[in-house]
Image (cartoon, rainbow, N blue to C red):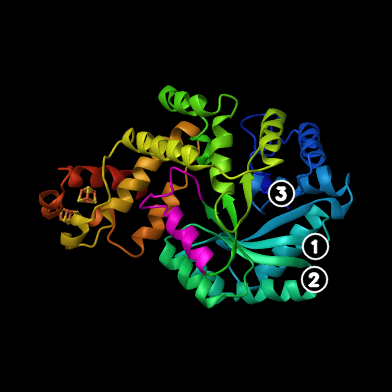
Amino acid sequence: MKKLGFGLMRLPLKNADDPKSIDYEQVCVMADAFLAAGFTYFDTAYMYHDGLSETAVKKVLVDRHPRTSFTVTSKLPTMHLHAADDQKRIFEEQLARTGAEYFDVYLLHNLGTENYAKAKRFKSFEYIASLKEQGVIKEIGFSFHDRAAVLDEILTEHPEVDYVQLQINYLDWEDAGIQSRLCHETAVRHGKKVIVMEPVKGGSLVRLPRSILDTFSALHADWSPASWAIRFAAGLDNVAVVLSGMSDLAQVMDNTGYMKEFRPLGTPEIGVLREAARVLSEGTSIPCTACRYCTEVCPKQIAIPEYFSLYNNEQLANKGGYSLQKQYYTTYAQHFGKASDCIGCKQCESACPQHLPVRRYLKEIAARYET
Ligand code: SF4
Ligand code: SF4
């Protein structure tokens, strides 16, 4: 399988304010170009485009192409489950919406500490394994947004999964909050195939500062910023496919062009990306180095560097118009002190080698994520 997947979550719209107003004619042209270039992997989910992304699978693929000429991945929305019976109802609805008869890959959507507890309660892993046995799902897995330690726990308890879908990009690679590298290493250690989501960080790695674009052009004048990010993710061990949420034909042509004969990045390119990540991180609002001296002294066990990292990510993501940081914050706050738990003792500020006004930042973070 070629390593580029078509993410059906940012499809072209007729009305920019209405996620249901999918421009099906344009999507047909894009999907046909994708298939003609030899790519086959399409990714949808129950909630994308308010439910109509799965309908797009039927209109654009199932009704127009042989079922064996493409693969469809969909996901069980763990965040919408209220009872074990919801799983069967939703799965049948998904099969009806897509008309796909079976899913090539089916994932538990958005696992982290909270949703994993729910998946255990409703026996979601057992449920998708039973669908695999029946042949209506070919391979199973889950998408994931949490710390590597939680991923390790899930994979240890569920060695039966085939895939893990992770947020991986060159900016989050060493990020203390997202833990891209640590999560990737965990998946590899467990021998899982990896699906990469957010390789361009919701568009943040497309709209780059001029200084970074210049270093890219100096090595490869004809590579787009998105192509640098997607090539980085596709070259990692165990990566089976990198998802790109394509919104127009130009993106399809660009992505399929360089991913047709994909070759992993070499040392000079990786060096350029590492430097780009450094420059982008420097441009963020809280210059925390994640040294963790503060957490060693904080009496309230507040996840200070993680919260700072999420806050910084949001500044970047806002430029791309997309953010999952609040969701990450809620997960962290279940295990560590909340930003608002700070009692102002100032021990963190005395310990911080960067002399950061931690208490002030925590107030801003509490105001942003706890309201
Ligand atoms: S000032 Fe707040 S964040 Fe800093 S050590 Fe004290 S309780 Fe923790
Ligand atoms: S001590 Fe300062 S630089 Fe180090 S992790 Fe804490 S806030 Fe960040």
- Check if mark 2's residue and mark 1's residue have beta carbons within 8 Å: yes
Magenta range:
168-189
Image side of residue 86 versus residue 366, left or right? right
Residue that appears at 33% across and 32% down: 283
> Quick check: is 185 in the magenta stretch?
yes
How many other residues sit within 10 Å of disc 3, few (<14), some (14-19) or many (≥20)? some
Mark 1 closeness class: few <14, some 14–19, many ≥20 residues within 10 Å: many
Rendered residue at 62%/70% (across/down): 161
For badge 2, the amino acid type reads Gly
User: Which of 259 and 316 lies nearest the eye of the viewer?
Assistant: 259
Q: Is mark 2 on a helix, strand or loop?
A: loop
Image point (43%, 49%), residue name: 173
Disc on the earlier residue, 2 or 1 = 1
Q: Which residue occupies the foreground of this view, 295 or 277?
A: 277
Q: Vertical placement of 101 versus 61: above or below?
A: below
Q: Name the residue under label 2.
A: 135
Label 2 vs label 1: CA separation?
Answer: 7 Å
Identify the residue under disc 1: 102
Q: Measure how far apart labels 3 and 1 are at the Cα level.
A: 21 Å
Q: Earlier in the sequence, mark 3 or mark 1?
A: 3
Amino acid on which the number 1 mark rests in the picture: Tyr
Callout 3 amino acid: Lys
Q: In this view, does 180 lie to the left or right of 341?
A: right
Instruction: List x then y, in percent, for residue 330.
Output: 40, 56
What residue sits right under mark 3 in the picture? Answer: 2
Q: In which quarter of the image is residue 132?
A: bottom right
Dots 3, 2 in contact, CB < 8 A: no
